[in-house]
Image (cartoon, helix red, strand yellow):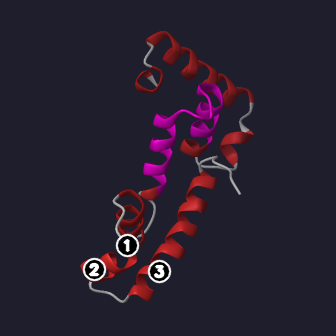
């Protein structure tokens, strides 16, 4: 939290608030894994637009994907490689890349939802 807030006192306040919420609402931990519930509570306390926390959540969600899905998502969306470039580099047909992107993004969306990130 210290890295997210750049303020030691604010970091302590956020951690204290998250733990307080968890102690008052133990059900929030029952339906999710603990990390997902705490991420969600921290997002509410810190602010939903905190790019560092968002990056942390995405990185954690990406780690849950298969290596094939993670590779094409990272290379396509973060490194800007085209489907043709990915197919050539990975020595698979373009249709395979498109399939991996489709199913990988679906899995990523689910992983983010499990961590308390909601969206369309």
Q: CA distance from mark 1 to mark 2?
A: 12 Å
Q: Nearer the viewer, residue 1 or 95?
A: 95
Residue assigned mark 3: 98
Quadrant in which residue 23 is drawn: top right
The mark that comes first in sequence, 1 or 2, is 1
Q: Closer to the camera: disc 3 or disc 1?
A: 1
The mark that comes first in sequence, 2 or 3, is 2
Residue assigned mark 2: 90
Q: Is residue 63 above or below residue 54?
A: below
Q: Residue at coordinates 63% horizontally, 54% vertically from top-left?
A: 113
Marking on residue 82: 1
Q: Residue at coordinates 64% horizontally, 46% vertically from top-left?
A: 116
Q: Main secondary structure of the magenta part?
A: helix
Q: Is residue 38 above or below residue 2?
A: below
Q: CA distance from mark 2 to mark 3?
A: 13 Å
Q: Is residue 100 above or below residue 31?
A: below
Q: Which residues are magenta?
A: 37-61
Picture coordinates of residue 22, whole percent (x, y): 66, 31
Q: Closer to the camera: disc 1 or disc 2?
A: 1
| Quadrant where the image shows the C terminus | bottom right
Q: Secondary structure at mark 2?
A: helix
Q: Say if mark 2 contacts mark 3, CB within 8 Å.
A: no
Q: Is residue 60 magenta?
A: yes
The mark that comes first in sequence, 3 or 1, is 1
Picture coordinates of residue 103, whole percent (x, y): 53, 75
Q: Is residue 68 magenta?
A: no
Q: Secondary structure at mark 3?
A: helix
């Amino acid at each position: 939290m210290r890295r997210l807030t750049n303020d030691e006192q604010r970091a302590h306040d956020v951690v204290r608030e998250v733990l307080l919420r968890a102690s008052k609402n133990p059900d929030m931990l029952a339906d999710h894994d603990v990390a997902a519930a705490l991420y969600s509570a921290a997002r509410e306390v810190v602010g939903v637009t905190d790019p560092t926390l968002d990056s942390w959540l995405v990185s954690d969600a990406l780690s849950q994907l298969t290596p094939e899905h993670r590779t094409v998502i990272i290379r396509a969306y973060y490194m800007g490689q085209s489907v043709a470039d990915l197919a050539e580099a990975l020595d698979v047909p373009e249709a395979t890349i498109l399939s991996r992107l489709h199913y990988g993004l679906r899995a990523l969306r689910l992983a983010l939802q499990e961590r308390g990130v909601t969206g369309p």
